[in-house]
Image (cartoon, rainbow, N blue to C red):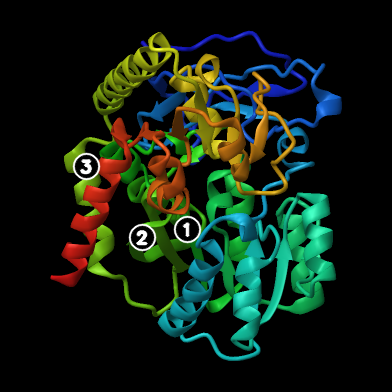
Amino acid sequence: MYLMEEHSVKTSVVRKRNDCRLCGSLKLELALPMRPSPIGDAYVTPQELSIVQESYPLSLYLCHDCGHLQLPHVINPEILFGNYIYRTSTSPGLVEHFKKYACAVIEKIGCKRESLVLEIGSNDGSLLQAFKKEGMKVIGVDPAREIALQATREGIETIPAFFTLDIARQIKKQYGLTSLIAANNVFAHADNMNEIAEGIHYLLDADGVFVFEVSYLLDMIEKNVFDTIYHEHLCHHRIEPLEIFFNKHGMNIFDVERIATKGGSIRVFVKQLDSKRAVSPYVKELIELERKVGLDQVAVYQKFSHHLEEIKIRLHAVLDDLRAHGKSIAGYGASTPMTTTMYQFELCPYLDFIADDNAIKQGRFSPGDHIPVLPSAKIYEKKPDCIVILAWQYADLIMQKHHAFLDGGGCFVTPLPEVKVYTHIIFQKQDREHTLAIAE
């Protein structure tokens, strides 16, 4: 008996698929129940405040045939990505990460100068800029029209479309076969996974490589990185279901690297089945580790759900105590994952405003509950007593930048990976211990 979750939504905006996105199986079971949430990046302007933003299902289902974990509810991509405002270049550390990424991949696969590199979901072209500087010919494909046009104006030719087999045919006709195709977090965004794989298989030359980075399901479970669950992320990947999927499309995984990006990710290298590239034993090792943890079993996700509820209870206890003593509370970080954290931990009623350093988000209002997003300098004008760091992965950077807030008697709270409260004294102690550890 497979559990089916019901939630009333407009079918013109969202549809629910009842088969596995990777293998097509109908054996799907509700594994990780989540509270419905509005679209994570749908920050509204003052003129749009009267618009009621609907919440959509966010629960994840497990395939009992290949073991893939997915969000079956698919929001119309034109609504989700058509006016997408996130730009890679605004994320701390990502541009530098992409420079290192490009150099590492070129060295690993032996990519020659003037080779053609395609990125699917290229956003503002940050990664392709890095490949271009290393002497590669580059082209991007991205459905966010304004971002694609801006990238083209800045020297990275970008096709404003979703990647399909037809787009692959157009690229081959105009540019020829590719030596390298990259598709990073977007590989978790796609509903048409089979068509994308067909296009990749079609476009890669005989020794070509497809490389992608996505959040790793194993890290999500082990490190409580549940804020990677939002409507853009239709797939939550691990190696074994991906290997089955690529085999079906005439390709196979020949290497995997675990990296720290976004709380824990994998960089996966894929080749044509008849390519002579050697397969790393690490691929099999990771598959065995996934089985050992039980990522193909619903029980693991049920346990994870209970753990998240315990974190929420602890967080509410801290915030309720602050409110009981008349303290004011703000948030820090206006990102897409923040929306997941806000709704799953039910934080909206606690926060007076959200501080953020991204000028694009400033002056807007958060999805759904319309909490104002202000420049972080406003912290010293508004003087909240406590700030919940929603962008918890950058907590150290934020606390170092706003040490004056702590010096003035304020406190920071991080909700993940566990609830922690930082005051001036506690942060000084932690900073001192960190310095000593580096010195040693």
Determine the residue positioned at 56% across, 30% down. 339
| Residue 277 visible to an observer of this rendering | yes
Q: Amino acid at mark 3?
A: Arg
Is 326 on the left or on the right of 148, as rendered? Answer: left
Q: Is residue 142 above or below residue 312?
A: below
Q: Is residue 205 above or below residue 212?
A: below
Disc 1 to disc 2, C-alpha distance: 9 Å
| Residue 210 visible to an observer of this rendering | no
The location of residue 81, given as percent across then percent down, is 72, 41
Circle 3 residue:
291
Q: Amino acid at mark 1?
A: Glu
Determine the residue positioned at 54% across, 19% down. 348
Determine the residue positioned at 56% across, 39% down. 380
The location of residue 28, given as percent across then percent down, is 43, 23
Circle 1 residue:
213
Q: Nearer the viewer, mark 2 or mark 3?
A: 2
When asked about the image quadrant of residue 383, the answer is: top right
Q: Nearer the viewer, mark 1 or mark 2?
A: 2
Q: Which of the marked residues, 2 or 3, is nearer the chain's N terminus?
A: 2
Circle 2 residue:
259
The location of residue 84, given as percent across then percent down, is 73, 43
Mark 1 and mark 2 in contact? Answer it, CB < 8 Å. Answer: yes
Element type at mark 2: strand
Disc 1 to disc 3, C-alpha distance: 21 Å
Element type at mark 3: helix
Is 317 on the left or on the right of 184, as rendered? Answer: left
Q: Quadrant of the C terminus?
A: bottom left
In the picture, the disc for residue 137 is none
Q: Which of the marked residues, 1 or 3, is nearer the chain's N terminus?
A: 1
